[in-house]
């Protein structure tokens, strides 16, 4: 585990309105469809308390046991993956990090789909029962931006992005974007677009049906 540079606590008003503990995360993958056999090649998680303060962070490369996919996007080559664990080896760690926390990602449905598939294959349920998409929260805030890409939101709030499509840096950036969104949402009295996640076994059945259909 490593600790990010400390961020000051958010205002008490924000903490009172949104009392959640968050697991802010990002994954890099071999492609776009876990139901077609695409896998995770990198995962990063930052644990954030209700005050918006980072408690700890964790990340790892993951051996997908296949071609790493779009190297031109994520920069993760076969050479970088030498010695990396397979996902089943890290699944208990991921479960421990996410337990009791709101699952937060940018375009959260994508990250949720991949993590659910990997955890299911490892025989461990994904413990988060709610997820929050920072993209959808940005939509509710009606921001004066051209689009809602993470890079655009980072620039809007003056957050420096060092390595786009690197899970570690994307997660660092997303923590600051989340903090900015929570602050603005509290001032505008906006409810968070929390989604209750699918029950255990739902995604497994869905993927099974997709594979049979294919």
Image: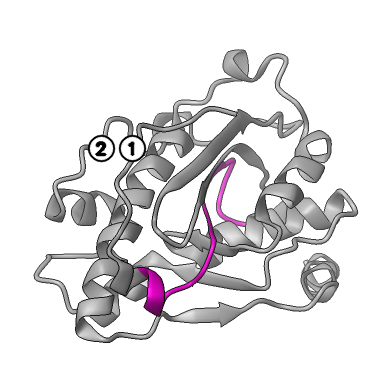
Work out which quarter of the rendered image holds the C terminus and state it.
Answer: bottom right
Q: On the image, numbered disc 2 is attached to which residue?
A: 161
Q: Position of residue 58 (x, y in %)?
A: 58, 35
Q: Is residue 5 magenta?
A: no
Q: Tell whether 22 sits left or right of 101.
A: left
Q: Tell whether 129 sits left or right of 148.
A: right
Q: Is residue 100 visible?
A: yes
Q: Tell whether 146 sits left or right of 85.
A: left
Residue 13 to residue 49: above or below:
below
Identify the image's colour scheme: rainbow, by chain, secondary structure or one colour.
one colour
Q: Which residues are magenta?
A: 15-34
- Local packing at callout 2 (Cα closer than 10 Å; few below 14, some 14-19, many 20+) is some
Q: Tell whether 18 sits left or right of 131.
A: left
- Res 114 → quadrant: bottom right
Residue name at image x 22 percent, y 57 percent: 153
Residue name at image x 16 percent, y 53 percent: 157
Work out which quarter of the rendered image holds the N terminus and state it.
Answer: top right
Q: Secondary structure at mark 2?
A: loop
Q: Position of residue 86 (x, y in %)?
A: 78, 32
Q: Secondary structure at mark 1?
A: loop
Residue name at image x 83 percent, y 73 percent: 200
Looking at the image, which is closer to me, 181 or 15? 15
Q: On the image, numbered disc 1 is attached to which residue?
A: 164
- Local packing at callout 1 (Cα closer than 10 Å; few below 14, some 14-19, many 20+) is some
Q: Is residue 35 visible?
A: no
């Amino acid at each position: 585990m490593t600790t990010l540079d400390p961020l000051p606590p958010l205002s008490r008003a924000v903490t009172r309105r949104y009392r959640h503990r968050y697991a802010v995360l990002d994954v890099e993958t071999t492609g776009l469809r876990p139901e077609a056999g695409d896998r995770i090649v990198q995962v990063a998680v930052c644990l954030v308390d209700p005050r918006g303060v980072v408690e700890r962070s964790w990340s790892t490369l993951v051996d997908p046991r296949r071609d790493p996919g779009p190297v031109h996007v994520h920069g993760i080559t076969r050479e970088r993956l030498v010695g990396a664990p397979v996902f089943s080896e890290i699944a208990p760690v991921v479960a421990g990090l996410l337990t009791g926390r709101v699952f937060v990602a940018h375009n959260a449905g994508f990250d949720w789909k991949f993590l659910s598939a990997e955890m299911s294959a490892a025989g461990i349920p994904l413990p988060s029962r709610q997820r929050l998409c920072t993209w959808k929260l940005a939509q509710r805030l009606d921001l004066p931006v051209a689009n809602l890409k993470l890079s655009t939101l980072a620039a809007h709030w003056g957050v420096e992005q060092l390595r786009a499509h690197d899970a570690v840096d994307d997660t660092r950036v997303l923590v600051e974007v989340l903090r900015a969104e929570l602050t603005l949402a509290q001032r505008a009295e906006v409810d968070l677009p929390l989604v209750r996640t699918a029950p255990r076994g739902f995604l497994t059945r869905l993927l099974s049906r997709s594979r049979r259909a294919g």
